[in-house]
Image (cartoon, rainbow, N blue to C red):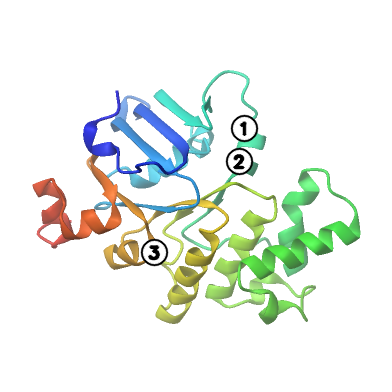
Amino acid sequence: MVKENNKPLGNLETVIQVRNLDFFYGQVQALFDVSLDVAARRVTALIGPSGCGKSTFLRTLNRMNDTIHGTRVEGEILIHGQDIYKDGVNVVDLRRKVGMVFQKSNPFPKSIFDNIAYGPRIHGIKDKKKLAEIVEKSLQRAALWDEVKDRLQNNALGLSGGQQQRLCIARALAVDPEILLMDEPASALDPKSTTRVEDLIGELREMYSIVIVTHNMQQAARVSDFTAFFYEGSLIEFDATKVIFTNPRKKQTEDYITGRFG
């Protein structure tokens, strides 16, 4: 049963439905009975103090936690009604559909072109013209094309930190995902680069459903349509971002938003 305070989407299309999710690292439970819906082509922000479970929750959405030995999931995560934890789910296909951008930019020690073409090649695209089209389109969508179009064969590690992060976003977009997960994508960037990434998120929401973890509440208020507040592994409140930041229903949410703890 979805808790009453977790129905803020109204008539918007739902792309992800999380139902009664519990998550364990070995014997240690990290998430407790989390239920929420993620709207299609909107930005959902996950906020809360360090260690509250928001990054763990984010990684359940494309089964990235599967790579950690001894983890266990109970409950359901449905994408377009399909349970992604059912037996027989192709995890490679899932992660193509649900892309991820990490906190620390992690370009491969290859050329800019090869970084973007890596995913499409893995998925069987070999045609050079098609790959070039994908690289250009992905870099344009990541607002990086004009800055790198004349040096596509240069090593990606020569880019600035902000450019590397946008490159990683372009790399995620190259396999044509539907959903984009972002784990504190601007936390290691300077203010100017952070603004570029935030502007980019605003543009990408037209095409992708985005879930972003951020420790920066002002950033959550700026970029997101919906906000989920986590505390000690539980979802305390989930609503439209405007409601969370101006009129939260739970005192715990208000205390966190106003800086009384965190």
Name the spot of residue 65 as percent of width and height, x first. Answer: 48, 36
Location of the N terminus (image quadrant): top left
Location of the C terminus (image quadrant): bottom left
Name the spot of residue 192 as percent of width and height, x first. Answer: 44, 81
| Residue 158 location, quadrant | bottom right
Which residue lies at the image location 65% right of the left edge and 28% below the top edge?
90
Rounded to the nearest angstrom, the CA distance separating label 1 from label 2 is 6 Å
Kindly check if marks 1 and 2 are in contact, taking CB atoms under 8 A apart as contact: yes
Kindly check if marks 3 and 2 are in contact, taking CB atoms under 8 A apart as contact: no
From this view, report whether residue 237 is shown above or below residue 212: above
Q: Nearer the viewer, mark 3 or mark 2?
A: 3
Which residue lies at the image location 14% right of the left edge and 62% below the top edge?
259
Rounded to the nearest angstrom, the CA distance separating label 3 from label 2 is 24 Å
Rounded to the nearest angstrom, the CA distance separating label 3 from label 1 is 29 Å
What residue type is disc 2 on? Arg
What residue type is disc 1 on? Val
Residue pointed to by mark 2: 95
Q: Secondary structure at mark 1?
A: helix
The residue closer to the viewer here, 117 or 66, is: 117
Q: Residues within 10 Å of mark 1 (few under 14, many from 20)?
A: some
Report if residue 55 is visible in the image: yes
Residue pointed to by mark 1: 91
Of the image marks 3 and 1, the number of the one nearer the N terminus: 1
Name the spot of residue 58 as percent of width and height, x first. Answer: 42, 44
Position of 116 with respect to 160 (left or right) is right
Q: Residues within 10 Å of mark 2 (few under 14, many from 20)?
A: some
Report if residue 70 is visible in the image: no
Q: Secondary structure at mark 2?
A: helix
Residue pointed to by mark 3: 223
What residue type is disc 3 on? Val
